Image (tube, helix red, strand yellow):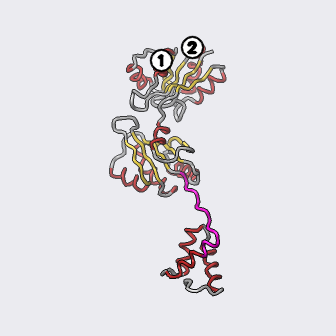
Amino acid sequence: MSTLFLVATPIGNLEDISARAVRLLGEVRLIAAEDTRHTARLLQHYLITTPCLSYHEHNKLVRVERVLAALDEGDVALVSDAGTPALNDPGFELVRAALKAGHLVSPVPGACAPVAALVASGLPTDTFLYQGYLPRRQAERQRMLQGVAEQPYTLIFLETPHRLLESLADIAALLGDRQIAVARELTKLHEEIFRGSLAQALAHFSTQAPRGEFTLVIAGCPAEAPRWDVDRLQAALQDAASGPEKAAQLARRLAAESGWSKGEVYQLLTRLRDVGEQGLPS
């Protein structure tokens, strides 16, 4: 029984590959590579001479049988151009087919751009939602963003340089001015991780032309503040007695702060005034 190894390769720095990955790439019968020319540079660097077969998005269905035939003769490695194969890259169908044919499937962990950006973002890492590339079309992109707008998890997306500003604008419009980390060229010479608000990110990349592949890490939807109890709200109304706010202004402000509706705050203010509370705004 042969094994299909899912081998993570560097996302930039060629040193970011494990000793096990280098050994296995030299031992397997065949390497199924997203771009054989790209993978050839990695193999040449480590003096690996294993034959390669192209396996990418446009030929993955017709190449499955050839990879399975190679697995019948020995182990095979699957690699993407960068990072962990089958994660936002071709591989899912091959994994399913290999398992169905009775072969083993084994991951060889290593570089992964979404996880690298997440752990360096400064945003919560305990729960996160990875969505891959944002859709090219604005309507589809906005639908995706609307679907996750109320999720409390840290959000992770991939984006290309020529769509970055449009996507940041859509994210700000639909998710609000949240905190974001924008990572580009991770592990490479010109690595940059911008951390700040979405408004600040838009301003930054509007003055510096986006270059390289981007990973966006965005804060989840903030939890709603607990609703004030009536005693706290009454105390706030009393505290406002000496201030300049009119009743309507006060009701609007306290509604935003307390979790009560503007109408509920105004009704409570009216009742307090009716029972003789002194100094309440009118």
Closer to viewer: mark 2 or mark 1: 1
Looking at the rendered structure, which numbered label has been put on residue 23?
1
Rendered location of residue 49, percent (x, y): 43, 14
In the displayed image of the protein, which residue is found farthest to the top? 73
Residue carrying label 2: 74
| SS majority, magenta | loop
Q: As shown in the figure, which amino acid type bears the numbered disc 2? A: Gly
Q: Magenta includes 223? A: yes
Residues at marks 2 and 1 touching, judged by CB atoms closer than 8 Å? no
Rendered location of residue 184, percent (x, y): 40, 41
Q: As shown in the figure, which amino acid type bears the numbered disc 1? A: Arg
Q: State which quadrant residue 67 falls in.
A: top right
User: What's the CA distance linking mark 2 and mark 1?
Assistant: 15 Å
Q: Is residue 147 left or right of residue 210?
A: right
Query: As displayed, is residue 34 above or below residue 275?
Result: above
Q: Residue at x 42, y 52 (%)?
A: 196
Q: Residue at x 64, y 24 (%)?
A: 99
Element carrying mark 1: helix
- Mark 2 burial class by Cα count in 10 Å: few <14, some 14-19, many 20+: some
Q: Magenta includes 34? A: no
Q: Which residues are magenta?
A: 220-234
Query: As displayed, is residue 39 above or below residue 237?
Result: above
Quadrant location of the C terminus in the rendered image: bottom right
Q: Residue at x 55, y 68 (%)?
A: 257
Looking at the rendered structure, which numbered label has been put on residue 110?
none
Element carrying mark 2: loop
Quadrant location of the N terminus in the rendered image: top right
Rendered location of residue 2, percent (x, y): 60, 16
Please tell me which residue lies in front, 226 or 36.
Answer: 226
Query: As displayed, is residue 165 above or below residue 264?
Result: above
Rendered location of residue 165, percent (x, y): 41, 50
Please tell me which residue lies in front, 251 or 243.
Answer: 243
